[in-house]
Amino acid sequence: MDRADIFSHPDSKWTEGLGPNADIVISSRVRLARNIQNIPFPYLLGDDKEGEILNLIKNIIQDPDFKEKVGIFHYLPLSELTPMERWVLVEKHLISPQHAQSHGHKGVVIREDEAVSVMINEEDHLRIQCLLPAMQLNEAWHLADEIDDRFEQALDFAFDKDKGYLTSCPTNVGTGMRASVMLHLPGLVLTRQGYQIFATMSQIGLTVRGMYGEGTEALGNLFQISNQVTLGLSEDDIINHLTSVTLQVIEQERHARGILLQEAKEQLEDRVWRAYGILSHARILSSQEAMTLLSELRLGIDMKIIKEIDPKVFNVLMVTTQPAFLQQKSELELQPQVRDIKRAEIVREKISSYSGGD
Ligand SMILES: Nc1ncnc2c1ncn2[C@@H]1O[C@H](COP(=O)(O)OP(=O)(O)OP(=O)(O)O)[C@@H](O)[C@H]1O
């Protein structure tokens, strides 16, 4: 995948949708916050120093040994990207919305398969993120650990022998790790059990966020669950705890789907087929409506109510129907009403490609 493909193709490693519990876990993410010793945190840095950090990282990823060991990365200084390109990276979950809106010498390096991205000068000098499809928290952690080791061969990270890694926000001190899963939980939402379960998360050191992380809405019944605590726990503790809670939530979601099938089969089928009908024929779709209907369609696919559509369609449409991706693809800035027409067209085409025409 070359640099231009990052903005024109919806596919990332996570959109492959393959792996354990892929019917409920859309993606698993591990991010490590790291800072370079003796350099102030980004919020205290002047432009020159920020520029130096960007250059440092650029040189590291261009080193032949680094490339051979951990792969080819594209270097993208945010100042060289259009606002639309930055938002495509948010919609592909490769950078945070906060990073997309920042000014100064910020950047990101992205591995060719888009499983790894490293934000530069976000809240910390480096935010190493590994994003894999389905329930692969352990795999994402091992990959992040490997990338971290490679950077650490070239950089001295700020580390305190008692506290661990030092980070700009005290909530990240220690491992600097946030592990998270993005879950599709329509069963828990429809049976009204979701909010009760989410309310207990903070009592067990976890937090529930919306589709694009901190401060964002939970669209399309998608929720991100992540660890709140980074201090006093090892990386393995964090991964094991999140894994065991996620497996319980998966069980509860399966149970809720079973109840729906047993107690409200016709209503469930009706909802799924209506979603299919609207998505296959609508001429205007807002992003919110599209996400809601795509979630219902995906539920129907996972519950074998609809058999001919590949569940991966949901992951890809989660990216291609988003405002920035739509506009980037059209190479035009589009008014919201025009975007809604374009979105409906894209969804119709994708769905009819499975069902033999609109
Ligand atoms: N499991 C996941 N799958 C896909 N994307 C994710 C997942 N978890 C987080 N993200 C994405 O990562 C970005 C940052 O998320 P979030 O704000 O929750 O975490 P963070 O990096 O730990 O930031 P902070 O330290 O500010 O809380 C967002 O764009 C979000 O969509």
Image: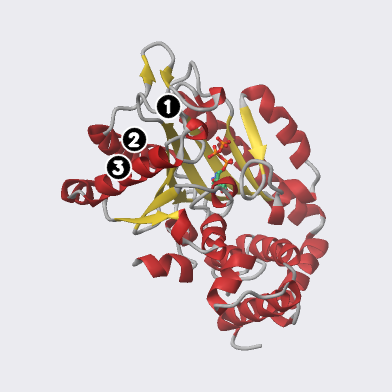
Mark 1 Cα-neighbour bin, 10 Å: few <14, some 14–19, many ≥20: some
Amino acid type of disc 2? Asp
Does 239 appear above or below 165?
below
> Any mark on residue 235, and which?
1
Q: Secondary structure at mark 1?
A: helix
Q: Can you tell which quarter of the image residue 84 is in?
A: bottom right
Q: Residue at x 69, y 75 (%)?
A: 339
| Position in image of residue 356 (x %, y %) | 59, 87
Q: Residue furthest top?
A: 162
Seen from the viewer's position, the closer of residues 304 and 149 is 149
Q: Which residue is mark 2?
A: 145
Q: Residue at x 20, y 48 (%)?
A: 63
Does 131 appear above or below 202?
below
Give the position of the C terminus as an image quadrant.
bottom right
Q: Can you tell which quarter of the image residue 160 is in?
A: top left
| Position in image of residue 341 (x %, y %) | 71, 80
Q: Secondary structure at mark 2?
A: helix
Amino acid type of disc 1? Glu
Q: Are marks 3 and 1 in contact (CB under 8 Å)?
A: no
**Distance from Cα at disc 2 to Cα at disc 3:** 20 Å
Q: Are marks 2 and 1 in contact (CB under 8 Å)?
A: yes
**Distance from Cα at disc 2 to Cα at disc 1:** 10 Å
Q: Which residue is mark 3?
A: 56
Q: Give the mark nearest the N terminus, 2 or 3.
A: 3
Mark 3 lies within 8 Å of ligand 1 (Cβ measured): no
